[in-house]
Image (cartoon, rainbow, N blue to C red):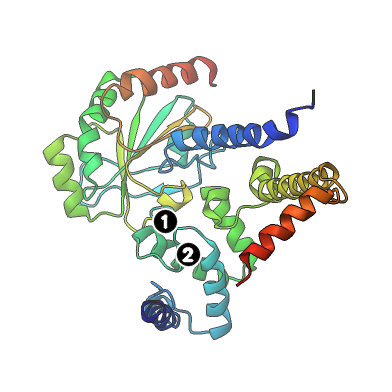
Amino acid sequence: MIRVMAFAALLLAALPLSPAHAVNPDEMLADPALEHRARVISRDLRCLVCQNQSIDDSDAGLAKDLRVLVRERLKVGDSNEQVIDYVVARYGDFVLLKPPVKGSTIVLWAGPAVVALFGILALILFYRRRRAASPVAAKPLSPEERARLNKLLEGDAP
Amino acid sequence: MKSRLPYLLPLGLFLVLALYFAVGLTKDPKIIPSALIDKPAPEFTVPPVAGGTSPGFSTADLKKGQVSVVNVFASWCVPCRAEHPEINKLAKMGIVPVYGLNYKDTPQAARAWLNQLGDNYTATGADESGRVGIDWGVYGVPETFIVDGSGRIRFKHVGPIVGDKLEKEILPLIRSIQGTGK
């Protein structure tokens, strides 16, 4: 029990730790609204060097270059979509941490739902079949069985 | 006899998924397909490496009607060092112009590197900010592009060209693009 509580305490202690961000103060834009948009965009863009981090989280050189690029595009007046399209045009869909829904990614998006559906269907079939197979009511005991049961129960009593 | 199909279905589903993932696992996750294949090379101009002997180059150089190779390298990149003899070999064959794109390097380091390892590039441009590299979709040097005569990117090789990759992969591709390309 103490061990479980200690573990829980450890988990709780780790909760407030948010991931460190790699954005340097000198990269930030003076305009807080633009800077906020830059952060939102860079959280969705994959660092291609480290692959499983966003460019917002990564210390890689290319990630920094892309962060600066995102801010430059925003400063000249691009919309968020235009900035993202600009990067996707150069690095492809892989640069998006959340893959777009299209023909080649449909298995990715629909796969889990299809598998879950199959599972639910299998469960329903299984229980239906089991109910159909089990007899509705048990056969009543024969007089001999009842006598034997009574004897057993009495013998068991203190 | 009752049908066994419902009981075999999960096994079948598992096998399909296992096969799907097994195929995925054979692929190298470090190699990201280029978004620029069969697209025109980006518009760019790179100045020569400062203090170097070789000129810079630009998009116009890649549209001269002959297949060309663009090799992205940096002095700080260890695999580039390993691949450089192969790049020299390709350049010396004289079948295609080989352009060097010196990515995020200092002129001194780039010059020292070229002097030490041999410079057979047709031209060597310096992309000190890495911005031209981004336009080319470069994410891990060395990268090598094959561009056809009309300036369209036809192939990209990520990582060093070592071992028999030049003979087995790059040269046949160059020849086939030379045969079919404009």
Q: Is residue B153 visible?
A: no
Image quarter (top left, top right, bottom left or bottom right) of the N terminus of chain A: bottom left
Category of crowding for the residue at label 2, using alpha-carbon neighbours closer than 10 angstroms: few (below 14), some (14–19), many (at least 20): some
- Residue under pointer 2: A69
Residue A151 vs residue A45: left or right? right
Residue at the top extreme? B179
Residue drawn 66% across the image and 37% down it: B10
Q: Chain of mark 2?
A: A
Residue B175 vs residue A38: left or right? left
Q: Quadrant of residue B115?
A: top left
Q: Are marks 2 and 1 in contact (CB under 8 Å)?
A: yes
Residue drawn 41% across the image and 29% down it: B68
- Residue under pointer 1: B131
Q: Chain of mark 1?
A: B
Q: Quadrant of residue B161?
A: top left
Q: Check disc 1 and report its element: helix, strand or loop.
A: helix
Q: Amino acid at mark 2?
A: Leu
Q: Amino acid at mark 1?
A: Arg
